[in-house]
Image (tube, helix red, strand yellow):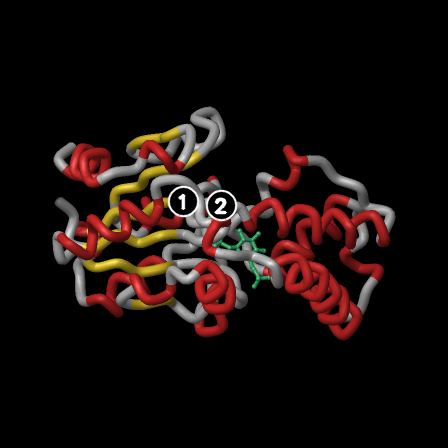
Amino acid sequence: YPQAVIFDLDGVITDSAEHHFLAWQQLGQELSIPFDRQFNETLKGVNRMDSLERILSLGQANDRYSETEKTALAEKKNRYYVESIQHLTPQDVLPGIIDLLKDLRQNKIKIAMASASKNAQFVSERLEVDHYFDHIVDAATVEKSKPHPEVFLKAATAVGVAPTDCVGIEDAAAGVEAIKSAGMRAIAIGDADILNAADLVLTDTSKLSLTTLSGVFSK
Ligand code: B16
Ligand code: MG
């Protein structure tokens, strides 16, 4: 078994990736920069300001706004997002996640969260999963966005486990890249074509278990 499992939040523990998509899409429409789900894949796991820059580049609009205006745009997106996550409940935890968290605790395997989201603590509390975690990295302390490994390395350090003894679980291509650059095993949830850099790709979270984790670990 791994000694620590490091979870992404959005798209792994809950489907808040969909809420992020809708909030960015709303802002995009207001800026006359429409985009689809395929483009949205490139935003997953990427922090707020970097996501905004990617959307502005899509519309060739990076130079159209001052830094102050960009901050205001990012805050606007966050308001849409925060509004949409107010009603999250424990029922919004994706299938198989609670059983896995319980199994990990029972086996004394450390559990950490490496989300790019500054709303991660709030979302974890709404879902009532926060108490399972030995550590939740504060995204505000992370300088470099995924695919940089910083957030995963911070999580491993916080629980005192070497990266080579960790498994990371992600739904985003940028996140899988971050896990691999951190020197960890990666399990991805989603489309195998997009997430092919992972050691194992599962179609959905119900396929996660101690057995799947140990499988990827003994590779
Ligand atoms: P916030 P994760 C990421 O969370 C999301 O995938 C990404 O879409 C979002 O822009 C980012 O968090 C920042 O979130 O605006 O709430 O700080 O997938 O790393 O858990
Ligand atoms: Mg994610």
Q: Quadrant of the C terminus?
A: top left
Instruction: Compute the Cα span from label 2 to label 1.
Output: 8 Å
| Number of marks present in the image shown | 2
Residue 33 left/right relative to 213: right
Disc 2 + disc 1, Cβ < 8 Å: yes
- Disc 2 beta carbon < 8 A from ligand 2? yes
Q: Quickly name the residue at label 2.
A: 11
Q: Quickly name the residue at label 1.
A: 170
Q: x and y percent of residue 158 in the render?
A: 26, 69
The residue at 58%/39% (across/down) is 41
User: Closest to the observer: 125 or 2?
Assistant: 125
The residue at 41%/62% (across/down) is 128
Residue 201 left/right relative to 101: right
User: Closest to the observer: 62 or 1?
Assistant: 1
Task: Give the answer, above or below, for where 85 lies relative to 38.
Answer: below
Quarter assignment of residue 130: bottom left
Q: Earlier in the sequence, mark 2 or mark 1?
A: 2
The residue at 30%/60% (across/down) is 112
User: Under tag 2, what secondary structure?
Assistant: loop
- Disc 1 beta carbon < 8 A from ligand 2? yes
User: Closest to the observer: 82 or 37?
Assistant: 82
